[in-house]
Image: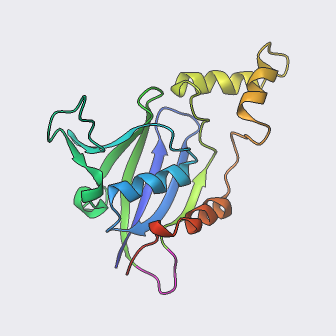
Amino acid sequence: MAIYRIHVSLLDIEPVIWRSLELSSQTTLRQFHRILQIVMGWENYHMHEFLAGKQRYGVPDSTSDEPGEVIVEARVHLSDVLTTPGAQIQYIYDFGDYWQHAVCLEEILTAEQDAAYPRVIGGARSCPPEDCGGTGGYADLLDILMDPTHEDFQHMRDWVGAKFLAEAFSLRDINLRLRRNRSLAAKS
């Protein structure tokens, strides 16, 4: 089984929020969406799509998408859109906040015996909280949380919760969440 090592980074945020993961090349884009929700820390509250060049992949909306405008993601594998190392696509999550993720195929590997896929092998920082207002709202949130004297500090701290730490990243916790979702496991 071919294993893809993929680098994902959230665009327009500094320092960068990123993940490096390994998964089967036969993962569908639908499965990949669910994996990205887990590894990035999103809650799957919003719509999403993948962009490969000008082609859109996702869940077509019969009220706003023309027939054929959005290709059904459940029918497309990573190997269909990421064919060679260096190939890139975009993942857009939450059309309101418009979180853009750069997805790059770094390397094609052979599966390790007894390894569990998908798995995260590296990363940095927590993902922004859902519905925080996109990159600008997130920057404002971080500024407020850095200043306990700010008039909105307590309100925003309560809103994000005491557990939210922008710099936190736990490889162990993310991989445990992936393991709990057996339907995402690579099939040999």
Residue shown at 55% from the left, 24% from the top: 133
Which residue is the extreme one toward the front?
Answer: 63
Residue shown at 41% from the left, 30% from the top: 95
**Stretch of the chain drawn in magenta:** 111-116
Quarter placement of the N terminus: bottom left
Which residue is the extreme one toward the top?
Answer: 151
Residue 115, image x and y in percent? 51, 80
Which residue is the extreme one toward the bottom?
Answer: 113
Residue shown at 63% from the left, 46% from the top: 125
In this view, 139 is above or below 45: above
Residue 179, image x and y in percent? 57, 69
Q: In the image, is residue 4 part of the stretch drawn in magenta?
A: no
Residue 124, image x and y in percent? 61, 50
Residue shown at 54% from the left, 49% from the top: 40
In this view, 166 is above or below 169: above
In this view, 105 is above or below 18: below
Quarter placement of the C terminus: bottom left
Which colouring convention does the figure follow?
rainbow
Quarter of the view holding residue 53: top left
Residue 70, image x and y in percent? 22, 41
Q: Count all numbered tags in the image, as a single digit.
A: 0
Q: Main secondary structure of the magenta part?
A: loop
Quarter of the view holding residue 137: top right
